[in-house]
Image: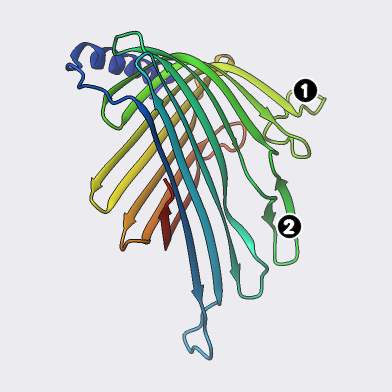
Amino acid sequence: MSKQSCFLILFLTILISAVNAKEKKEEKYGWRNKLVGALNMTHVSFDNWAKGGENTIAWQILVTSKFEKNHKKYKWTTASKFNFGKTKVDGFNFRKSVDEIKLETVFTYKMGSYVNPYGALTMQSQFAEGFKYINKAEKNQVSAFLDPGYFTESTGFGIEPAKGLRTRAGLSFKQTVTSDFPKPFADDPKTETIEKLKTEIGFESTTDFSRKLSDNLRVTSKLEMFSNLEAFDEIDVNWDNIFRAKVAKYVSVNMNFRLLYDKTVSLKRQINQSLALGLTYTFI
């Protein structure tokens, strides 16, 4: 599907939702806050096991938050995701398995209609050094804290056609900041100099979906698409999904599936998925 078709479908969806939207229910004003933390650990050990196997230790910490102020004239939402984990296989040191920092704040001004203007700021990066392993003894570092770091400022219009579903689209300014690892994140291979900062102007669309499927199961999904004005036939995609199933009061199963596509980084799509059973606690 072409990029023009994607944006046409998005525009028609917004238009149809605005025309067919039913009368709003009475809104509740004030703060709604949520902070959830999960600690997951896995340990597999073998001793004289005839069928073979590798001793394994893995741990992961996932913290998500959402702070929302709903006012008669505006709505201000700030969300975050911190995800980090390591794995150790017998004969190797601990290696990073999951690493993500995501911060986002969105301010929406209510015009009294179903389509409202917004302004948004986002930041994405990672906590620790990242390596590409050649073999047991050799490795090459490919990333570090805020290297690369992605910052985006955007403005446009958004709708909330149903509870738990929000879509927005507009003009976006994106900066990719690097220090020691400009390639392939920020450097332009067409020039002789090595660029450590890449600035892009384009269009973005972001769709947030959160739904409690049952008393013990919740799904949260976020689909982000960005189109550079200089390469309008290419779409960067960031699709992040979290499934959380509550097994007991403080025990849950957490699954995170993330799909990335950025042609400047890799010609193929990138997939990161994790499934873990561990402790989950809702602070707020």
Q: What is the secondary structure assignment of the residue under circle 2?
A: strand
Q: Position of residue 132 (x, y in %)?
A: 67, 53
> Sequence order check: which comes first, mark 2 or mark 1?
2
Q: Residues within 10 Å of mark 1 (few under 14, many from 20)?
A: few
Give the quadrant of the C terminus: top left
Of residues 10 and 3, the one nearer the viewer is 10
Q: Is residue 188 visible?
A: no
Q: Determine whether, in the image, residue 263 is placed left or right of residue 74.
A: right
**Spatial separation of the CA atoms under disc 2 and disc 1:** 28 Å
Tell me which amino acid carries mark 2: Lys
Q: Determine whether, in the image, residue 107 is placed left or right of residue 135.
A: left
Q: Position of residue 64 (x, y in %)?
A: 47, 44
Q: Position of residue 69 (x, y in %)?
A: 41, 26
Q: Is residue 57 visible?
A: yes
Q: Residues within 10 Å of mark 2 (few under 14, many from 20)?
A: few
Residue position for label 2: 139
Residue position for label 1: 191
Residue visible at 31% across and 47% down? 218
